[in-house]
Image (cartoon, grey):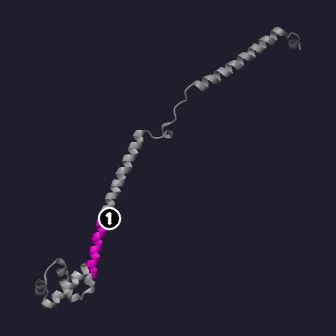
Amino acid sequence: MEFFENFGLHEMVIGTAVLLGIYSGIVIIRLARMSRPRAPEPVWKQPPTQFGEQVLKTGIEAELAELRGEVAALKDEVILLHEEVRLLKAARNVSPQYGEAVALAQKGLDAPQIAERCGISVAEAEMVCALSRRQSE
């Protein structure tokens, strides 16, 4: 072990200086990494910008307007279907021979015209008109 026999104070100071230099280099590298700005997050992980939020909001508003239009159209269709059901119920409640008279009464013809067209008496036509008015109310 010749190395340890020749190991003196001079070698010990040099070894300590080398170790201190290595340690200082490591500390400087770590400090440089901490102060360096980090790379920005990928775009897909970033929260939406104001423009992105505005585009999203505009899309939602457009879809909402479209849905409101569809609801309004469906409401109109339901109203028409209710009217058809009412007319069908009125026609069902009347004898089949008076079906045409009821249809004419619902169109707004008066009793003498209905009596003339359907070949019934004016009294019967007045009764059909009265029933038709009562059911429409």
Quarter where residue 104 is shown: bottom left
What residue is rendered at 41% in x and 41% in y? 52
Quadrant into which the N terminus falls: top right
Q: Does residue 130 appear in the picture of this structure?
A: yes
Tally the marks.
Answer: 1
The spot of residue 56 in percent (x, y) is 40, 46
Task: Measuring from the top left, give residue 89's x and y in whole percent.
Answer: 28, 81
Query: Hey, which quadrant is residue 107 in on the image?
Result: bottom left
Foreground pick, 99 / 83: 83
- Residue holding disc 1: 74
Q: Main secondary structure of the magenta part?
A: helix
Which residue occupies 20% across, 89% down? 97
Badge 1 amino acid: Leu
Magenta stretch: give its range.
75-89
Whether residue 116 appears in magenta in the rendering, the answer is no
Q: Which residue is at 63% across, 23% downward?
A: 31
- Residue 81: in magenta span: yes
Q: Quadrant of residue 20?
A: top right
- Left/right placement of residue 90 relative to residue 35 reads left
Can residue 120 be seen in the rendering of this structure?
A: no
